[in-house]
Amino acid sequence: AQSVAQPEDQVNVAEGNPLTVKCTYSVSGNPYLFWYVQYPNRGLQFLLKYITGDNLVKGSYGFEAEFNKSQTSFHLKKPSALVSDSALYFCAVAGRRGSTLGRLYFGRGTQLTVWP
Amino acid sequence: GAGVSQSPSNKVTEKGKDVELRCDPISGHTALYWYRQSLGQGLEFLIYFQGNSAPDKSGLPSDRFSAERTGGSVSTLTIQRTQQEDSAVYLCASSLAPGTGRVNSPLHFGNGTRLTVT
């Protein structure tokens, strides 16, 4: 079965500092991994995905994520945080077979707060 | 172009009443998903449609929950005899069909329906 874990409920960082939001996954076979962001009272917005290829994936709003197969991790990163990055971030892994194909399994989310 | 549209945006209902939540996906998206987001919880998968059929209903929490999709487009999630624990934000998402060469195209989410059962 596929699953992801986000070990931190909250991450706080000062504006201008680098940020990392952690995610680890558990899948059989090669994973399809995603990051989504949710702003208050909005749906989720796609940030980036890893399917295959380079381990460093670049996405929207200056975010990137590093796929690490040996550590089964897919941490979200940004070199310099902005106050406007404050939001709820979800890591997800996609189903690979049968009726789960395409379905996303989400982590519990990490609330990122960037303070000025 | 238009995104995923959900209505109503907010719904307050009394315990025991039935409610219907509507999702209008992006045109051309054949895959449609319903998720539930409760306070302090992650995103709970409810049901997945491919066209009008639902190959995966495994997430529906009880037989009070049902969903249908007609014409390969609009979907309705119905909750009968609502309970207070049904209070949550119900999110709908759509995507291009998985497994058609567009490997895991991103899900596009609506803004959700916030359901409050009093």
Image: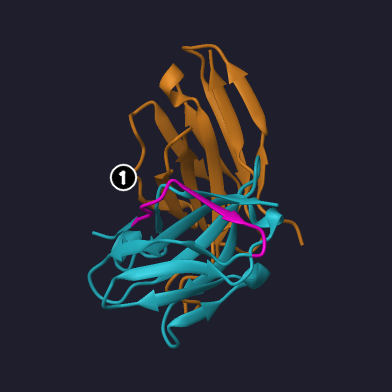
Q: Amino acid at mark 1?
A: Ser
Q: Position of residue A64 (x, y in %)?
A: 54, 73
- Disc 1 target residue: B58
Going by the picture, which residue comes out furthest to the bottom? A53
Which image quadrant for residue B111?
top right
- At x 57% / y 67%, what residue is drawn? A18
Give the farthest residue toward the right. B1
Q: Position of residue B21 (x, y in %)?
A: 58, 33
Residue B74 placement (x, y as % from top left): 60, 47
Q: Which chain is cyan?
A: A
Question: Is residue A6 a member of the stretch shown in magenta?
Answer: yes
Colour of chain B, in one word, is orange
- Residue drawn where x is 29% and y is 67% of the image: A97
Q: Is residue B118 above or below residue A14?
A: above
User: Is B86 displayed left or right of B94 in the figure?
Assistant: left
Magenta residues? A5-16
The residue shown at (69%, 54%) is A83
SS at circle 1: loop
Q: Is residue B83 visible?
A: no
Residue B17 at what x, y percent from top left? 51, 14
